[in-house]
Amino acid sequence: MPDEKALGVLETRGMTAMIEATDAMLKAVDVTICGGHGVGSGWVTVVIEGEVASVLAAIDIGSAEATRHGELITAEVIARPSPSSVQAMPHTKLTGLNRDAGTAALGILETRGLVPLVQGTDAMVKTASVEIEGWSYIGGGLVHTIVRGDVASVQAAVEAGGKAAEAAGEFHAKLVIPGPSAGLGCLLPPPIDLSAVPEGTLGVLETTGYVSVITSSDAMVKSADVELVRLSIASGGRVDAIVRGNVDAVQSAIEAGRIIAESVCELNGSCVISRPAPEMAACFARSPADAANVNPSGEAMGLIETRSTIGLVKAVDQMLKSADVRYEGRYRAGYFLTASIIRGDVGAVGQALEIGAKEAEKYGELVAAELIPHPFPEIETCLARA
Amino acid sequence: MSAAIGMVEVEGVAGIIVAADVACKAAEVDLLGWESIGGFTTVFFSGSIGAVTSSLKSAQVAASEIVDHVVAAPLTQPEDICRDYISFPIDANASAPSGALGLLETRGYGAHVTTNDEMVKAAQVEVFNVLTVHNRVVCSMILGEVSAVRSALDVGKELVNGNDYFMCATLITQPLPEVFRAFGPRA
């Protein structure tokens, strides 16, 4: 009877610890993955099933591996699970359970923030002959890249990537899996299209919050001849702007962006990669599928961002009532902050923001309230809607 | 003139489930839905200014009894776009079960898999839904008769007690159908 299968639950902080633990479990004993779920802040869970003895052994091995490579949150075995307790649970909806992880060695580089990941990934592809599988975020600012290749290449790549990431920012973990177990496929990021390669030098600017990234992007594209290629979520409230152009332009753009980001909210880091590896550039700078279809209107833009839904709703309600402004939409930087954009003439938007900021502060934390008098049209087409 | 809106925001999601139930029982208001951001959630309901005001007060008191960080605010003449912020509108056509509702909220997911299993085995209850609202917050919603849900919750609390990640556990003896329609499983 399939219902007689035991369940094992393993929860870790960080994807590297999870992949290492899961691979060890799948290789050591006869168990299969039957679900998984992430709850943000870098906490991820896999659920395995099999014979009781196998599941017990697997969870033992898995928790030891997870502890060695990161942080173990939960390790539990349910010998005879009640089917009715499981069916309503979100881990059962994990997709990609049939996805094969392939036979090539896998390398994982995990960092906090996208700047060290971009630098580390660039170093990985330049150091050895490895292919980028993809990248993903799991909350709390934790992001990871997966590469593939032969064992020696992956080892060399991950070594170099780890060093580069450490030099560039907050390194979290790295790992090489010489022969991945087939079941690991469901933990890998979705494969991405690496054909569209943005040319030139790349600049990455990481800030906290949507308002900060929009205003600093606007400053970057105005201050130098650079093109904004992507706004990207790094999770934990962090957002990145990626620009391209010639090396001098990108350098001065990043300088200008840093100053604005610091004044608006928080600057988490930046980098300039003068000759990015094409695969890396394509991986992180692919055009956003989630960009809003906004027609550049030329009107002044007001941005307001909070950590509280009530704060934001009250602010928007007050702004629309007290000034001649138009509501454009709501935007999110991951799952931590919530932002809205209003439009109108400069005076009205400025007045509205002042009122909105005061109102928002009554109900919770105001992250930023900023006015862009003449937003660069390119910025408007890059906005990612909630 | 559009109806007034009441909003209650709490850390986690159990607090607004309780707030939603209390608000709709306290006065003539309609539950609109809820929103989640960074581990905090906000419930929205609408009605006349008087109804919203008294509902808000009761809901705030009820939520404060079980969770920290409760913020409540009315919108007396809301702009239409204020409803844009409700990412999870109530599903008016969803079927609503009957019974008492137990809420067990902790940080982390793994513990809910085992705790729900133990609760279902300990008493005649079922898992109605499991909500995850970011920043690791997970809330299990347990359904059954009052006494069954009460003993299941006792078992659940026992398992997660002493665990740093425990947030709250509470029982709603007669939840309104709207509560199930707003916080039920979504496709």
Image (cartoon, rainbow, N blue to C red):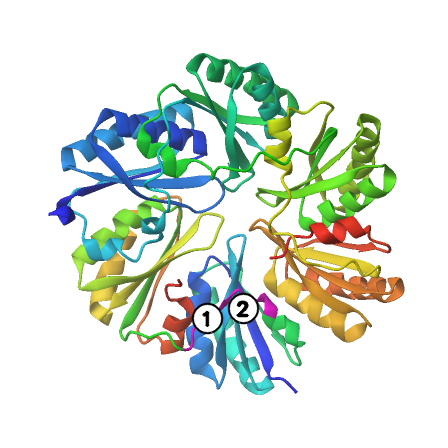
Whether label 2 touches label 1, CB < 8 Å: yes
Label 2 secondary element = strand
Please state which amino acid type lies under the numbered disc 1: Ala
Q: Is residue A67 visible?
A: yes
Q: Which residue is mark 2?
A: B8
Q: Residues within 10 Å of mark 2 (few under 14, many from 20)?
A: many
Q: Give the SS element for disc 1.
A: helix
Residues rendered magenta in the picture: B84-92
Q: Is residue B155 visible?
A: no
Q: At which x and y percent is residue B128?
A: 30, 64
Task: Residue B27: give x, y in percent of width and height.
Answer: 48, 85
Earlier in the chain: of badge 2 and badge 1, it is: 2
Asked whether residue B85 is drawn in magenta, I would say yes
The residue positioned 61% from the left and 24% from the top of the image is A122
**Quadrant in which residue B181 is drawn:** bottom left
Within 10 Å of disc 1 (Cα), the crowding (few <14, some 14-19, many 20+) is many
Please tell me the numbered disc located at residue B19: 1
Asked whether A59 or B167 is in front, the reply is A59
